[in-house]
Image (spheres, rainbow, N blue to C red):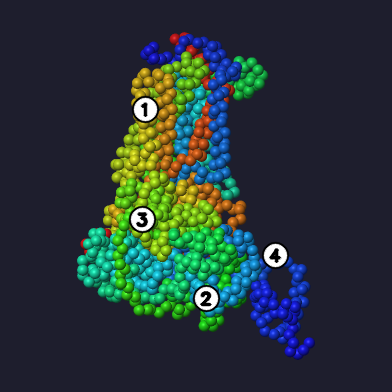
Amino acid sequence: MADIPERPPVMRGHPGTREISGRIASIVLKGQMPRFFWLAFLAAFLLVLVLFTTVAWLITQGVGTYGINIPVAWGTMLSNFVWWVGIGHAGTLISAVLLLFRQDWRASVNRFAEAMTLFAVAMAALFPILHLGRPWFFYWLLPLPNTHMHWPQWRSPLVWDFAAIATYGTVSLLFWYIGLVPDLAVLRDRAKNRAAQLFYGILALGWRGSAFHWARFDAVYYLLAVLATPLVVSVHSIVSLDFTYGMAPGYHSTIFPPYFVAGALYSGFAMVLTIAIPLRRLFRVEDLITKRHIDNGAKIMIAAGLIVAYGYAAEFFFAWYSGNPAERMMAWQRLVGPYAPFFWVMLACNVGVLQLLWFRRVRLWMPALFVISLLINLGMWLERYVIVVTGPSTGFLPAAWGTQSLQWVDFGVFFGTLGAFFALMFLFLRILPAITIFEVGELADERREA
Amino acid sequence: MSATGELWRSLEERADDPALRRWIDAEFPALAEGLAGAVDRRQAMKLMGAALGLSGMAGLARADEIVPWVKQPEMTVPGVPRHYATVLPSEGYGIGAVVQCHEGRPTKVEGNPDHPSSLGASDAVMQAACLELFDPERLRAPERGGRPVGWAEVARAMVAWRDRLGEAGGAGAALLVGPETSPTLRRQIAGLKRLYPALRVYRHAPLRTPGPLALPDFSRATVAVSLDSDVLGEGPGRLAHARASADARRVRAPGDGMLRLHALETTPTLTGAKADHRAALRVSLVPLAERALLAALDGAAPDANLPASVRRWVTRAADDLRAAGQGGLVLGSPAAQARVGGPVRYIEAPDAMEVDGDLADLCEAIRDGTTHALLSLAFDPIGTAPAGLDAGEAFGALDTLWHHAAHRDATARMAHWLLPAAHPFEAWSDARGHDGTAAIAQPLIHPLFASRSAHQLLAELAGDVTHPKAPVRATWGDLDDRAWLEAVQRGTVEDTAFAAIEPPRPAPPAATTPEGFDLSLLPDPWLREGRHAQSAMLQELPRPLTKIVWGNALQIAPGDAERLGVETGDIVQVTADKIQLDAPVWVMPGQPAGSLTLTLGHGRAGPVSGFARGVDGFALMRTGRRHLTGMTLSPTGRRAPVLTTQHHHAMEGRAPVRRATLAAFTDDPRAPHAHHPPPPEESLYPDWDYPRESWGMSIDLTACIGCMACVSACAAENNTPSVGPEECERGHEMHWLRVDRYYDGPPEAPETLFQPVPCMHCEKAPCEPVCPVNATVHTHDGLNAQIYNRCIGTRYCSQNCPYKVRRFNFRSYNDFDVPDLGQNAKNPDVSMRQRGVMEKCTYCVQRISAARIAAEVDGSEEIAEGAVVTACQQACPTQAITFGDLNEPDAAVRAEKDSPLNYGLLEELNTRPRTTYLAALCNPAEGGDG
C-alpha cells in the first residue's frame, strides 16, 4: 500500500504488440487453465444444475412455488430481471460510450465487460419468462400474425419491455462480436491445431487485417457504438416504466427512469469490479488491467451511487410532498414495515459502504474494493426487491395488505442464474480472448510512439 | 287337497318357522305382509306365474349397459338447469332452499323466498351443501366392525335386533338423536315407543339453547336491545331477523327513520358489530347486567359492580326502551321484554322434544347396565361429548352400537355397525323453520353411495320398510295428493307455523362470581360442532370477524393479552379443573376483559387428517355448559401460525368505509363524504359507449352484516377452488369476493365495519391497459372481462388493481386429469381456470348471458329489470347488494346510486368504479359515545 503512484498508468511497462498478442492468446490457445479455474467452473456448473432443477420444478408446479401472492404478485423473478439487466449496463457503457469519448482506459476491460453484458442480459431474459404463469406462451408478447387473433396490447409497458430487451440483447451481441473479429483472426493465426484454426477461422470471417478491413471495421464499430449508446439510457428507462406506469404506491413515480439507469450503471460497475479484481490477479494481467482501470470504475460507482442515493431521497421527499396518504404510508412502511430489514441493509450497502470509495486508499486496495463491490451488488439486488414488493404490499386498501416471503425456489433460481452467468464467463475466458488484443496492442503502440 | 287346506311352498313355511319369517322380512320386506294371511287361488296363480317369469331372468346380470339418451325425458333440456324446492337442516331447524340441478346434479343452493326462515336468502353453510354431497370422503357402504357389508346384512341384523326388542319391549335399547324439528322423526319415534315401550330416547344437542323461541318483529320496533343474543349471526331465524332488522335500518334519504340497536355481548358477534351502542361484558356478569337493565327500566341506577362502560350502556338502553314504549325489543332477556312489552311473540321451540335425557344420562344408563344397545342418529356423540363424561369409555361398554354417520368420525371407530347417512339432497325428510313452518325435503339425486336416511333406519326398526318417501308422506297424511305436491313444490307446508304461547317470565338468573377467566365455547360459524369440518370450502371461508381460515384460536381481550405478554399466535395453556388445553391465542378487539372465546368443531380427526386443524374446544366443555368460569392461562413460549386472510385491520385514515351518524346525515346529506374531495373527471381515454345494457352494482354498507353468505355463494356459483391451508398461509386464497373488516377506535371497544369487495368493473380500469396480451378487456355492456384463454399470467393487472380483487391460479387448483367426485358440483356455465391464469369477479356473466339469451328467445330487445341477479346478491340475507342495468332509468340500482349516500371506493384514483357503496350509517343516541 505504501508505493501507490500518484495516478496509476493505464498500462504498466512497455510490452510490444507481439508480446501482448502472445500473452492474451496463449491463455486461450494453450488451454492450460489453472486448477482454481476448473474448481470454480465446477462450482458454477453445480449451480447451473440447481437452476435446471428449480426451473423444472417451477414450470411443472407453477409460479406459486416461489414467494408471490395476492397482493404482492410480483416477486424475485422481476427483481432478478431488473438486477441482471442493470448489470448488463456497464458493458455497453464501457464499450460504446467510453469508445466514443476516446477513453483509452477502456481497452483492456471492455471485452469481458461486454461478455458480462451479454451473459447478464441472457440471464435477465430468462426471468420475464419464468415470471409468467404460463411461460410456454411467452411468444404471445411478440407481434406475430397468428390464428388465435392474438395481438400485443401496445399500451402495456411489458410489450415495450420485451422490445427494449430484445433490441439491447441484439445490439450488444453484434457489438461484442464485431469487436472480437480482429482478435479471432489473431487466435486463428496463432492456433497450433487444425480444430482451433477452423473454429477461430470461421468465426474470424476472413479477417486479414488489411487497411481496407480496418477502415470498414472502424466504421461499423463506431456506428454500432453510436447505436448502442442511447440503449444504455433506454433499456433501463423502459424497464422502469413497468413500475412508473403502475398505480401502486411506490411505483407511480417519474423519478424511476433516471434513477433506474443510474442504478444500472452502479450495479454494472460493481459487477465489473467483482470480476476484474480476481481476474487480473489470477491471470497475472495486472499490467494490462491496472489499478487505473479499477480506480476509474470505482469513481463511476461513486457518481452513479450518489444519483441512486438522490433517488432514494427523492422518493421519500415526494411521498411526503404528495400528501397522498397511501404514498406516505408506503414510504413509512419501507422504514419500519415487514420489509424494513431489506431496506436498511440496502441503504447500508448502497449509500453507507459507498462513502468509503471517497478514499483513494480504499479505491486502490483490491481486497476492500472487492468486498465493497460485492456488498453493492447485494444492495442493488435488495433495492430492486424492495421496489417490487413494498408498493403492492401496502397498497390503497389496508384490508388487502399482505407480504410475500422468499421460498427455496426464489433462491434456487437466483443462485442458479448466478452459476450460469459465471459458468458462461468461465467458458468465455477459456474460449475467447478476455482482453482485446488489438486495442491493447494499439494502446501499447501509441505509448511507445509517445 | 282339501278346500280349506293351506298352500305351502316349503316345509319351513308349512311349519311357519319364525327363522324363515325373519329371513323373508329382511330379504323381501314387501312380501312379508302378503305372507301373513292365507294365500288364495288368484294369488297362488300370480306367484306361480311370477316364479316362471323370474326363473327366465336368472341368467341376467344387473343392468350395467349404458343407454344413449335417445328419448329425452320430457321437460328436460340439456344445459338448462331445473330448480327444486327443498329444505336444509341447520342445527335441526329447516331453512328453505331452492336447488339448481344441471342434468340431475345439484350444483347450487339458493334460499327459498317462500320459506319464512330463508326469505330467499341463504347462508354460507347452505352454499357448501352441493360440495358436501359430492364429498369423496363420505362413507360409501355400511360396515360391521370395520368390514364393509351390504345393507342386506344390516337388515338381517336389524331384524334380529327387532325380534329381541319386541321380546323385551325395548328394554336395554336406546335411541340417540340430535337436535331435530322433523315431524316425521317425531312420529317415527312415537311409533317406536308404542312398539317398544321400554325403548329410551336420548338427545345430544351440544349447541342447543333450551326454552321457548322469541320471534321479534323488527318492522314494528324502533329500539332493539340485545343481551348477549347474536340475533343476526346465530339461531334458526338468523336470516329472517337479519332481513327484518336491515329493513328497519334502511335509510336512503334524509328524514328516513332507523331502528336503533343496542348490544351487550360477551364475545364479539355480528350483532355487536352492527350495534349503534355496544358494550362488552364477561359472561359471568351478564345476569348482573340483565338485572341492572330491569332495574334501570324502573329508573334505578345500575349496579356499581358493573364496569362503567356497561353501566352507561344499561342506562342508555333503558332510556331508549322507555322512550320506545311498545316499539322496544329486548332480545335475550324475556324478563326485560315482558317488562317492556314490545312487538315480540313466543312460540314453543320447534326442536323441543320429550326425551329421556341427554348424552350424560345416556352414559349413565350404559354404565349402570340399563342400556346395552344403542342406535345413534346424532352427530358424532363421542367426538362432541363434554370433557369428563368419557363417552368413549361408556360407549365401549355397549353390546351393540349402531352409528348413523356421514363420515368416519370419532364414534365411527367404536361402532359395531356403521351406517352411512344420506345427504339431505338424497333423502326424503321434513323440518320446521324458526317459526314452526314445516317444509318437505325432497331428494334431488339418487343416493351416490349405499347410504340411508334416519327415517329409513327408524322405519326398518319399526318393521315397516317401504319406499323411502313413505315415512314422510305418512306424516303428512292430512294433505291430499294435490296439497302434498304443492307443499313439495313450494317447499313449505301451508299453515304449519306455531301459534304464539304465553310469554315466559323467568326470573333473571342468579349472578355467578367471576374468577380467573371466563370461557365461552361457541360453535364455529361454519363448521358448527364439527358437522361441516369435512368441507374444504367452509374450512377456507374466512370467519366473519377474525377472518381466520383452516383452524381456530383462543380469543383474548387486548388488555389481557398485554398483561400476560402474549400476542396472536402464541400458544397458551388453558387450565380448568385440571383439564388442560394448549391453544394459540388470537388478540380480539372488542373481546371483554377477563373473557375467552374458543370455537368448537376444530381439531377433530376425520377421514382427511389435514382438516383436523386448530384445537378441539370440546376438551374443555362441561356437561350442558358452554360458558365456564375460573380458567387460568399460562404462556408456553411456543408459537403456532393462525391462518387469516386479512392482516391489517385499521383504515389508516383513508376511510374506505365512509360513514356518518343518522343525525349528521339528516342535517347534511353530504356528511359521509366530508373530507373526501369529489373524484376527478378528466381522463386521457375517451368514454365508452353503451348502446344496450350498462351493468352496475351497489352495496349498502349499513345493511351488510358481514355474514359471508355472499362470499360463499360466489365460490359455489363460480367454481372458485379451495386451495388448502398451506396455500392460504401464503396468500393464495381464491375468493373472488371478500368482505373487508375494519376496526376503528380503541381495541377494547372498537367500531367494526364490513365492506364486501368484489371487482369494481372500473370504467377506467387500471388493469386493462397494462395487460400485454389483451386478456382483460372492456365489454359492450360495461363489464371488465377476463379472458382466461388469452392470459399468460404476467399478473400486471393484479399489481395495478388498487382494490386487489384479482385472484391468480398460482398452482394447479383444478386438476382436470384426475376424475374427482367434487367436479359434479361445479357449475357447468362457468369455465374452469387452469394454472397460471388470472381470474376475478365477472358480475356473474353467465347469469347475464342466460338472461340475454332468454330475452332474445322471447323476442325482446332488452333484458328486463331484475332478470339478472348475481350470486352474491341472491344469497345476501339483508339485501345489501343491488345489481342491474344503469341505462335503465327505473332500475333499482339506479335509484341506489342516486342516493346521497352513494360513493365509489378509491374514486379519487379516477378508476370510476361500477360497483359503488352506500355509506354506512349508524344511529347512536344523542350525546352518545360509541
Residue A317, located in which quarter of the rendered image? top left
Q: Nearer the viewer, mark 1 or mark 4?
A: 4
What number is the disc on residue B631? 3
Separation (CA) of disc 1 from disc 4: 79 Å
Kindly state the secondary structure of the residue where label 1 is placed. helix
Q: Chain of mark 3?
A: B
Separation (CA) of disc 1 from disc 3: 55 Å
Graded by Cα atoms within 10 Å as few (under 14), some (14 to 19) or many (20 or more), the crowding at tag 1 reads some
Residue at the image position 54 percent from the left and 19 percent from the top:
A214
Q: What residue is disc 2 on? A: B198
The amino acid type, in three-letter code, at marker 4 is Asp
Q: Are marks 3 and 2 on the same chain?
A: yes
Kindly state the secondary structure of the residue where label 3 is placed. strand
Separation (CA) of disc 2 from disc 4: 46 Å
Position above or below: A247 against B518: above
- Give whichever of discs 2 and 4 has the lower sequence position: 4
Position above or below: B789 against B66: above
Residue in the foreground of this view, choosing between B510 and A160 = B510
User: Is the residue under label 2 in contact with that under label 3 (CB below 8 Å)?
Assistant: no
Residue in the foreground of this view, choosing between B820 and B891 = B820
- Give whichever of discs 3 and 2 has the lower sequence position: 2
